[in-house]
Image: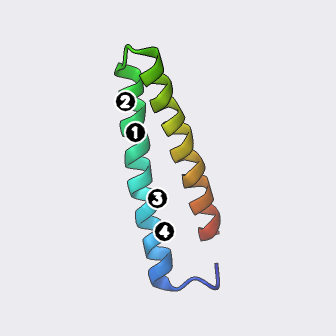
């Protein structure tokens, strides 16, 4: 992380916040959805958002 500027770290933190918001939206959509294919799509998006979140966290360590 020593190679990241303060602005870079700030931008990563913003991405984490927005990513968490997206993840929560996808989770809500998946829970409310009745079509199995659409439900599966949103569940995959939840997983993808979590993976991205974990990668961003690694940059902050």
Give the residue number, with chain letter if any, for mark 3: 16
Which of the two labelled residues, at mark 4 and mark 2, occupies the earlier sequence position?
4
Real-space CA distance between mark 3 and mark 2, rounded to the nearest whole angstrom: 18 Å
Task: Give the residue displayed 46% in from the left and 15% down from the top.
Answer: 36
Mark 4 lies on residue: 12
What is the spatial separation of the Cα atoms under label 1 and label 2, in whole angstroms?
Answer: 6 Å
Please state, as top left, top right, bottom left or bottom right, where the N terminus lies in the image. Answer: bottom right
Q: How many marks?
A: 4
Mark 1 → mark 4, Cα distance in angstroms: 18 Å
Q: Is residue 9 above or below residue 35?
A: below
> Residue at label 2?
28
Q: What residue is disc 1 on?
A: 24
Q: Earlier in the sequence, mark 1 or mark 4?
A: 4
Image point (46%, 66%), residue name: 13
Q: Is residue 53 left or right of residue 11?
A: right
Residue 12 on image: x %, y %: 48, 68
Label 4 secondary element:
helix
Image x and y of residue 22, in percent: 39, 45
The front one of 36 and 28 is 36
Dot 1 or dot 3: first in sequence order is 3
Residue 15: x, y in percent?
Answer: 44, 62
């Amino acid at each position: 992380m020593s190679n990241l500027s303060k602005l870079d770290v700030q931008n990563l933190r913003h991405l984490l916040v927005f990513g968490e918001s997206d993840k929560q939206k996808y989770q809500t959509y998946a829970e409310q959805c009745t079509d199995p294919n659409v439900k599966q799509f949103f569940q995959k998006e939840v997983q993808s958002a979590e993976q991205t979140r974990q990668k961003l966290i690694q940059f902050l360590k």
